[in-house]
Amino acid sequence: MKKRLVSLVLSTMMTAGLVGCGGAASDSAAPASEQTQAESAESTESTDAEAADTANSDKSYSVDSITINIWDSNQQAGLQEIADDWTATSGVKVNIEVIDWDNYWTLLEAGASGGEMPDVFWMHSNTAQMYMENEILLDLTDYIANDPSIDKANYYEGVWDLYNSNGKQYALPKDHDTIALLYNKAIFDEYGVDYPTDEWTWEDMYEAAKKITEGSNGDIYGMAMNTSNNQDGWYNLVYDYGAQVITDDHKGTTIGSDEGKAGMEMMRKLLTVGAPQSVVAETGTDSLFQSGKVGMITQGSWMINSFYTAENHADYAWAMLPYADTNGNGSCDKGERFSAYNGLGWAANANVADPQACYDLIAYFCSEAGQKKQAQLGVTMGGMKGVSEDFSNAFEGMDVSAFVRAEEEGDLYFRPYTRNTTVWEDALQQQGAFLDAWQNPEDEAAMATACENAQKIIEDAIAAE
């Protein structure tokens, strides 16, 4: 079974696009200013020490060190600081190693087939089901049952449930994320376009992008969206207009419905006034934005650090995602502004030398103290409810509250997944699905046909699972 898993995952993961919660790692340094980090550390130092002392009381471990693998360099410094709090009382050293996205999964898959695996690592919605079903992850169920500090009710339900298989829990929620609209104020000023507001519809975004693109004679694009990055892009339009990429029971889709077609029609319109996909594929939306070639992009909270530390960050600002005024009443009602959210899980190797030590480290990362410090340092939003405000205050001089307001004032849906997510995700990017429509957005009929084809692709993939 493990060999079958490795073969299947290798054939799908290597072709998958970068997706949420740090799917793309930046070379940027840690997020918040040194002063902010110092103040956060000082204010929580005693609490962290007490929490770590409590977590490790009466514990003795058979290992001197634990190795962690992650794929986002932006998060390394903050997570290491939290791990060091645990080390101070446990006596077990924690080494966090950053492996780029593609190599991360290659190494993990090699370990699953008999090679060497890290002790603790991140799990993602793309592959969690296959790893859990094949007994590669440490079963945390009994550890959680004996740990009064971990309560499912305190975490985002979608993230917790993602890492549960057949009644067993294989990871604890590390974080969650939301999506917002990033814009360049200098470009808006240059072309006399009003800044985005929380009252913007997708039509408003289209009109603003059109003014910038046409006003610059195509030298600057009003917007850019990488169609391969579904979570921070076109998925949200499908839901805003009343359809679902994957239904709540994970057994179907409504992307080919009239509502799904309406959402993708809006996406098509945006692409007509945005950067062509050939340009996006060559340069990337983030690079286009930071080089001043694009006025707007949609982006996930896991990428704030890259823009916070960018050279022209003073020109950058965030707004909530636009909404779809489907009932035409001129205001955003429930179900008209959605943001995808996803969440990584802290997991451990099923054959780790000291399971208790690995669980205790994971539990500390996911404890109130660990989650608060993760948010205060600007590492990511928490997997635990109630710590997002700490995250929104972590970036001095940049208002990132749009990510928090996305869940307080809008609606969240968990990033669509099935047992073999990457099978249909990859197929949607190919000819016969959305590829032709992405590349030729002037063809309205092509997008409608693509939605119908996507309906069948997803249904067939689910039936084959």
Image (cartoon, rainbow, N blue to C red):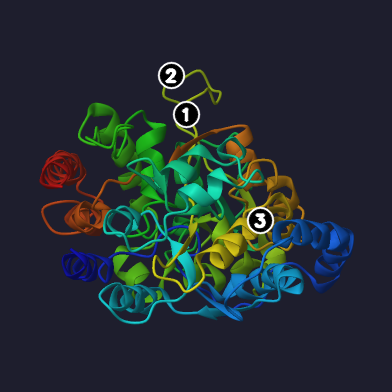
Quarter in which the N terminus is drawn: bottom left
| Whole-number angstrom distance, CA of label 1 to CA of label 3 | 23 Å
**Label 1 neighbour load within 10 Å: few <14, some 14-19, many 20+:** many
Residue 347 seen anywhere in this rendered image of the structure = yes
Q: Which residue is mark 1?
A: 336
At mark 1, the secondary structure is: loop
Q: Amino acid at mark 2?
A: Asn
Camera-side mark, 1 or 3: 1
The residue indicated by pointer 3 is 317
Q: Residue 358: horizontal and vertical position, in percent?
A: 55, 66
Q: Quadrant of residue 266?
A: top left
Looking at this view, is 257 or 380 the one in front?
380
> Can residue 220 be seen in the rendering of this structure?
no
Characterize the local packing of mark 3: few (<14), some (14-19) or many (20 or more) Cα atoms within 10 angstroms. Answer: many
The kind of secondary structure element at disc 3 is strand
Q: Residue at x 20, y 35 (%)?
A: 256
Q: Are marks 2 and 1 in contact (CB under 8 Å)?
A: yes
